[in-house]
Amino acid sequence: MLETKFKVLFLLAILAFAAIPIMGILRGSPLTPFEGSSTDSTNAVPTATIDPSQVSREEPVQEEMISIPAGPFIRGTNEGGFDERPQRTVLLEAFAIDRYEVTNHQYQQFVDVTGHRKSGPPARYAKNMSKMLSINQPVVYVSWEDAETYCHWKGKRLPTEAEWEKAMRGSDGRLWPWGNVEQPNGANWARVQDGHEVSAVVGTVQTDKSPYGVMDGAGNVMEWVADWYGERYFTEAPEQNPPGPDHGVYRVLRGGGYATTGADIRITSRSKMVADFRDETIGFRCAVSGEKPERT
């Protein structure tokens, strides 16, 4: 008799535990601030952590492009990882690149006009999104395809990997935007307590400025560029206007981000990821060939 009761209780306990994930599915997951709700839009923003009055007073950062002159620059380094070698002199034609990473405000304009999907995590929960809602913080949780589509909508394109490196590094082979002496607090990284738990408003860290005046190349968020990733591409690439490999598995990410530590901080460091990946540490900026347009 006791054995039968024990079996019944044991079975009920199993059923109760099995019901927990089912109930979670039925109830749904909390929405991120980037996702609307068809029944209650107030659930989209965690009001305990957002001050709407502060956001509404913020003026959008003015869009601006920086002209990068035609000419040679030193690409790669023999002091870095295998895929950063060899150090070579590469010649690029003139181009222009956004001074700042694309912001939440700019990307939302694109979404409003085109109906393209909003920036946001593939899942319905990301712990830091409530801290990254400023209109002037870099847009994140965008895939390579999202970034490319935005740039084309603006009449621009993603920069090539070579263009990105020249714009952030200058022509003299420096390892950081400010020179060859490492500064732990030189950019928005995870190395020091700099007051930025996540990404900062674009252009905040003034030391993270390239010789051309392009901001946030070393830190803030990592950035998609146009190229497919090739581990040995620096060895095989042409010396003039290298376009990147013609195929691949991964797209290239350049620059560090607010979560970056260790040796990845060099401006020459290269990262790679599948094109449809989205993360809170990844954003982008755009470029154009030739002189910068009068209006962006």
Image (cartoon, helix red, strand yellow):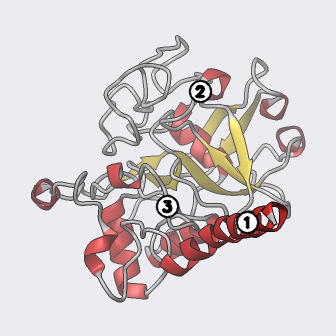
Q: Which residue is mark 2?
A: 265
Q: Relative to 28, does residue 184 appear above or below in the rendering?
A: above
| Place of residue 115 in the rendered image (x, y in percent of width and height, measured from the top left) | 43, 87
| Place of residue 202 in the rendered image (x, y in percent of width and height, measured from the top left) | 34, 45
The disc labelled 2 sits on which kind of residue?
Ile
Secondary element at tag 2:
helix
Q: Relative to 224, does residue 145 appear above or below in the rendering?
A: below
Q: Quadrant of residue 254?
A: top right
The numbered mark, 3 or 1, whose residue comes first in the sequence reads 1
Residue at figure coordinates x 89%, y 41% from the top left: 232
The disc labelled 1 sits on which kind of residue?
Ile
Q: Is residue 4 left or right of residue 154?
A: right
Question: Which label lies toward us, 2 or 3?
Answer: 3
Q: Judge the density around disc 2: few (<14), some (14-19), many (≥20) Cα neighbours within 10 Å.
A: many
Residue at figure coordinates x 57%, y 39% from the top left: 255
- Tell me the CA gap for discs 3 and 1: 28 Å
Q: Closest to the observer: 97 or 84? A: 84
Q: Judge the density around disc 1: few (<14), some (14-19), many (≥20) Cα neighbours within 10 Å.
A: few
Q: Which residue is mark 1?
A: 14
Q: Is residue 296 visible?
A: no
Q: Residue furthest front?
A: 1
Residue at figure coordinates x 60%, y 68% from the top left: 20
Q: Which label belongs to residue 115?
A: none
Q: Which residue is mark 3?
A: 125
